[in-house]
Image (cartoon, grey):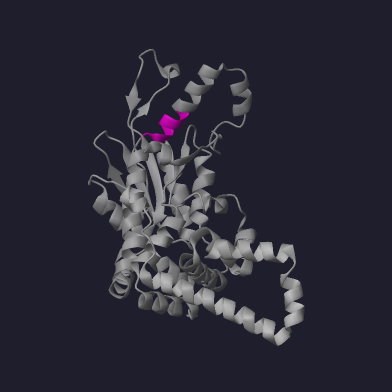
C-alpha cells in the first residue's frame, strides 16, 4: 500500500548553523563524498534526546522506527512553532501531514492568497464542489468551508499554517520525504453524508448556515488542551455519532495506517558502507490536528485495513428523493421564469445549440 502514499522528496538545503560556504565545499566533492557529508551532518544533529514541545506524542514500531506525532490547532501560531521545532530537533526521514491530494495546493499558496480564497465562497466554488462530490456532499463541503471562512474572518489567519511550515522545514532536512497522509476528502464527505439520516442532514446544515459566534485566538489555543478537545468531541458525538465516525474515527485509522507505512526501516545506500542491504530504523514526524491524536494512539498497535474505509456506499432512498425534489424544484422555477419573462423570448434563447448543450452538460454533472 506504500504506492498509495503521495510523496515529494524534499531537496536537501543547508540550515543556518551549517557553514556559509557549504556550496563551495560540495563543488569540490564527488557525489559519493557529498552524500556522506550530508548524511553525517544529519546524524550528528539527530544525536541525543530531542527537546520537544508538550504537544508531541512519541510512538514506536517493532522495527525500532520512531514517529513523533505533533498535535496541532489548525489556526494556531503556536502550532506552527511546535512543528518547526520538532522537525529541527529530530531531523526526520519522512514528514507526514493531515492533507490529501485535493488540498495540497495550500502548501504553496501564500497567506494573502489563502485568506482571500477562504473568505470568498461563490457559485463557481459551489458548482465545482457539486461536480466533484455530488449534490449532498458538495453542499455539505461548502457549508464546512463557510465555517472555515467564519474562523478566518474572526482571526484574520488562514488555515493550514502548520502544514506549510512542515513542508518548508522538510525541505531543509537532507534526504527527507514529504507524504500526504489523509484520506481523499471526496470519499470522506460522501461517506459522512451517507451515514446521516435526512433529518440529521437538515439539522447539521441549519447549524452550519447560522454559525456566527465570535471566536478569539485564546479559544483556538485552548484546542491544544486534550481535556477541552475531548469535551468538545463528546458533545459532537452525542448529537451526530455517525458523523464523528466517518469524519474523525475513520480518519484516525487511515492516518495511523499511513504513518505506519511511512515508519519502515531505511535501506542505506552503498555509498555509506561496503556492506550491502544495510538497514536502520527510520524517524517520522506526523503533523495532525490534536483531535486525531487519541485515535491514532488507540489504533497504533492494531492490525489496520483501510480497504473498507475507501469505499463509498450507494445513495440512500432519502437522498434519491431529495435529489429528485431538488431537480423538480429547479425545473419548476425555470418554467415559472419562462412564463414571467415571456414564452417567445425564452424559447428563442433555449433554442440556441450552445444553450442547449450547456444545460444538458450542467444537468448531467449535477444529477
The residue located at (53%, 39%) in the rendering is: 171
Q: Which residue is depicted at the point 61% across and 32% down?
A: 20
Q: In which quadrant of the rendered image does the N terminus lie?
A: top left
Image spot of residue 325 (x, y percent):
48, 77
* 217 shown above or below 189: below
Which span is picked out in magenta? 41-47
Q: Examine the rendered structure and indicate whether residue 201 appears above or below residue 274.
A: below
> x, y percentage for residue 278?
34, 21
Residue toward you, 310 or 250: 310
Res. 215 in view:
no
| Tally of marks | 0
Is 314 located above or below residue 10 in the figure? below
Q: Who's the residue at 46% across and 59% down the image? A: 78
Main SS, magenta region, reads: helix
Q: Is residue 271 magenta?
A: no
- Image position, residue 234 (x, y; %): 28, 71
Image location of residue 358, percent across then percent down: 67, 63
Amino acid at each position: 500500500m506504500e504506492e498509495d502514499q503521495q510523496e515529494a522528496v524534499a531537496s536537501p538545503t543547508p540550515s543556518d548553523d551549517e557553514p556559509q560556504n557549504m556550496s563551495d565545499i560540495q563543488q569540490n566533492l564527488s557525489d559519493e563524498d557529498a552524500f556522506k557529508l550530508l548524511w553525517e551532518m544529519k546524524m550528528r544533529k539527530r544525536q541525543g534526546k530531542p527537546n520537544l514541545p508538550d504537544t508531541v506524542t512519541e510512538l514506536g514500531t517493532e522495527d525500532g522506527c520512531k514517529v513523533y506525532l505533533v498535535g496541532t490547532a489548525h489556526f494556531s501560531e503556536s502550532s506552527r512553532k511546535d512543528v518547526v521545532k520538532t522537525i529541527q530537533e529530530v531531523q526526520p526521514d519522512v514528514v507526514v501531514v493531515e492533507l490529501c491530494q485535493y488540498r495540497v495546493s495550500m502548501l504553496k499558496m501564500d497567506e494573502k492568497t489563502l485568506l482571500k480564497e477562504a473568505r470568498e465562497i461563490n457559485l463557481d466554488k459551489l458548482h465545482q464542489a457539486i461536480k466533484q462530490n455530488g449534490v449532498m456532499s458538495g453542499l455539505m463541503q461548502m457549508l464546512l468551508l463557510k465555517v472555515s471562512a467564519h474562523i478566518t474572518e474572526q482571526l484574520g489567519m488562514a488555515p493550514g499554517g502548520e502544514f506549510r511550515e512542515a513542508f518548508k522545514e522538510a525541505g531543509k532536512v537532507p534526504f527527507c520525504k514529504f507524504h500526504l497522509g489523509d484520506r481523499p476528502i471526496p470519499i470522506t464527505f460522501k461517506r459522512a453524508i451517507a451515514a446521516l439520516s435526512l433529518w440529521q442532514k437538515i439539522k447539521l446544515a441549519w447549524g452550519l448556515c447560522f454559525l456566527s459566534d465570535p471566536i478569539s485566538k485564546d479559544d483556538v489555543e485552548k484546542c491544544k488542551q486534550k481535556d477541552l478537545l475531548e469535551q468538545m468531541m463528546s458533545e459532537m458525538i452525542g448529537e451526530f455519532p455517525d458523523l464523528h465516525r466517518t469524519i474523525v474515527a475513520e480518519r484516525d485509522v487511515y492516518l495511523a495506517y499511513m504513518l505506519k507505512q511511512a515508519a519502515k526501516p531505511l535501506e542505506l545506500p552503498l555509498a555509506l558502507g561496503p556492506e550491502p542491504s544495510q538497514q536502520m530504523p527510520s524517524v517520522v514526524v506526523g503533523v495532525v490536528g490534536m483531535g486525531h491524536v487519541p485515535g491514532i494512539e488507540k489504533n497504533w498497535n492494531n492490525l489496520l485495513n483501510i480497504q473498507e474505509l475507501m469505499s463509498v456506499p450507494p445513495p440512500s432512498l432519502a437522498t434519491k428523493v431529495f435529489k429528485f425534489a431538488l431537480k423538480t424544484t429547479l425545473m419548476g422555477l425555470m418554467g415559472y421564469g419562462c412564463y414571467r419573462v415571456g414564452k417567445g423570448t425564452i424559447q428563442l434563447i433555449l433554442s440556441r445549440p450552445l444553450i442547449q448543450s450547456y444545460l444538458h452538460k450542467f444537468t448531467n454533472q449535477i444529477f
